[in-house]
């Protein structure tokens, strides 16, 4: 049964208006998304389409999306919208890896016309502020719509594309619509350190937890209330279209939705589950598994043997075991070399804590492998959100001590986060 425009806007426009005014209601008073039949989830796009795209009526629309912007029939939403006369889709904006997903990490597709639709595609990667606002102005759109699958980690860049686009849209006087999708690592809770603004970068613009436990629509509400006005001088005119049928404890395989890799090294929901912890290895000289079929689940380096698996298993981390593993990355660190390390095997997803696990892996790797080193550019500090993880581990701190160090800031973030949660 399709939604009426009034019922859709009760979920979207009212929330957006409250956010734009800087007064977001407490979660206890916000509309909750009911659980759908059979555990299947309808995304924000599904609900927008069911309402005949009424929320976009009369607007020139630009989409910020990538290959994950698909329907339940795995049709790309840009192709669907372009073919539908009810929508005036006039531009596309591509993030890191590009709109069609042809670029590797740290790359994009540049400005071009999409061969399938003929639409102009503008490159947003590494653009922000006035430069990105000028792109929105040049495109001539009235409304910017965001629909990208996130994975739940602060350092995954799509949420900062969201933030940068919201700031730029506010500067350019554009309306902004966020179509929600699940957090594949669940939205049960936030964990990990909170970013120190002195370490802000494109892998963390604002102070949120390393594993934020939010959806992109919830993040958009938080951003618009707390951070966008300081960057743009005012909040953006924001609407959010929530999912129907998603619960905070749902893992991705419970949603009934197709998984499309959000980036080349995020092949499965299993990758997303561990990523908010093991991506910290990008800040070291160990391989984080890029160039293998199990990135972020395989970790290693030359000279590592079974001792690492033994050491980290001795930590008795909840929900996960570690197997001695040997692999040869086809690109990135140790390309073409057979190296030793570990593979993570998560056997209890509900108990598994990816951030604590990532810290335990760093602590034990440094203890058992004399070659351990941080990346010279201190990339670990940008990933962890401060220099604390690096300096504490260098000083000999154990896993429990490092994790305890962010307890206070995490509690404050959890209290803040609660105001913007929109699902049970």
Image: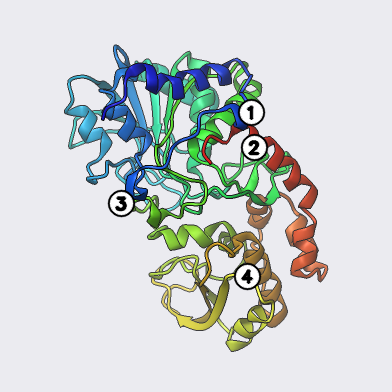
Mark number displayed over residue 258: 3
Q: Is residue 23 above or below residue 285?
A: above
Q: Are marks 2 and 1 in contact (CB under 8 Å)?
A: yes
SS at circle 3: loop
- Point out which mark residue 238 bears: none
* Mark 4, secondary structure of its residue: loop
Q: How many C-alpha atoms fall within 10 Å of the one at disc 2: few (<14), some, or many (≥20)?
A: some
Horizontal side of residue 118 vs 216, given as left or right: left
Residue at which label 2 appears:
418
SS state under label 1 = loop
The reply to whether the C-beta atoms of the residues labelled 4 and 1 are less than 8 Å apart is: no
Residue 126, visible in the rendered structure: no
Let me know if residue 88 appears in the view.
Answer: yes
Residue 264: x percent and y percent? 38, 56
Q: CA distance from mark 3 to mark 2?
A: 29 Å
Q: Residue at x 77, y 62 (%)?
A: 402
Image quadrant in which the N terminus is located: top left
Q: Residues within 10 Å of mark 4 (few under 14, many from 20)?
A: some
Q: Which residue is mark 4?
A: 318
- Residue tagged 1: 26
Q: CA distance from mark 3 to mark 1?
A: 32 Å
């Amino acid at each position: 049964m399709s939604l009426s425009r009034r019922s859709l806007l009760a979920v979207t426009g009212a929330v957006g208006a409250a956010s734009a005014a800087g007064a977001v209601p407490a979660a206890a008073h916000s509309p909750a998304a009911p659980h759908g039949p059979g555990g299947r989830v309808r995304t924000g796009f599904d609900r927008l389409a069911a309402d005949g795209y009424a929320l976009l009526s009369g607007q020139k629309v630009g989409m910020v999306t990538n290959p994950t912007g698909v329907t339940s029939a795995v049709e790309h939403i840009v192709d669907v919208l372009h073919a539908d006369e009810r929508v005036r889709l006039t531009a596309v904006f591509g993030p890191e890896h590009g709109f069609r997903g042809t670029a590797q990490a740290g790359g994009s597709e540049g400005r071009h016309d999409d061969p399938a639709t003929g639409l102009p595609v503008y490159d947003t990667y590494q653009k922000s502020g006035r430069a990105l606002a000028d792109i929105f102005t040049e495109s001539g759109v009235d409304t910017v719509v965001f629909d990208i699958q996130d994975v739940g980690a602060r350092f995954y860049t799509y949420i900062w594309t969201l933030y940068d686009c919201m700031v730029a849209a506010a500067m350019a006087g554009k309306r902004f619509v966020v179509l929600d999708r699940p957090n594949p690592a669940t939205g049960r809770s936030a964990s990990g350190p909170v970013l120190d603004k002195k370490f802000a970068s494109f892998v963390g613009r604002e102070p949120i937890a390393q594993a934020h436990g939010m959806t992109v629509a919830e993040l958009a509400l938080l951003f618009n209330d707390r951070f966008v006005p300081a960057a743009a001088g005012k909040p953006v005119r924001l609407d959010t279209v929530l999912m129907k049928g998603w619960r905070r404890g749902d893992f991705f395989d419970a949603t009934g939705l197709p998984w499309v890799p959000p980036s080349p090294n995020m092949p499965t929901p299993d990758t997303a589950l561990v990523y908010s912890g093991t991506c910290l290895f990008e800040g070291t000289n160990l391989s984080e598994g890029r160039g293998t079929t199990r990135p972020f689940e395989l970790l290693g380096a030359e000279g590592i043997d079974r001792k690492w698996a033994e050491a980290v298993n001795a930590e008795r981390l909840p929900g996960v075991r570690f197997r001695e593993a040997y692999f040869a990355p086809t690109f990135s660190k140790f390309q073409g070399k057979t190296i030793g390390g570990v593979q993570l095997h998560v056997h209890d997803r509900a108990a598994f804590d990816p951030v604590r696990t990532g810290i335990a892996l760093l602590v034990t790797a440094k203890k058992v492998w004399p070659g351990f080193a941080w990346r010279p550019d201190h990339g670990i500090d940008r990933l962890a959100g401060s220099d604390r993880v690096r300096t504490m581990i260098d000083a000999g701190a154990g896993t429990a001590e490092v994790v305890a160090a962010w307890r206070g800031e995490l509690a404050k973030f959890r209290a803040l986060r609660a105001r913007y949660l929109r699902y049970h």
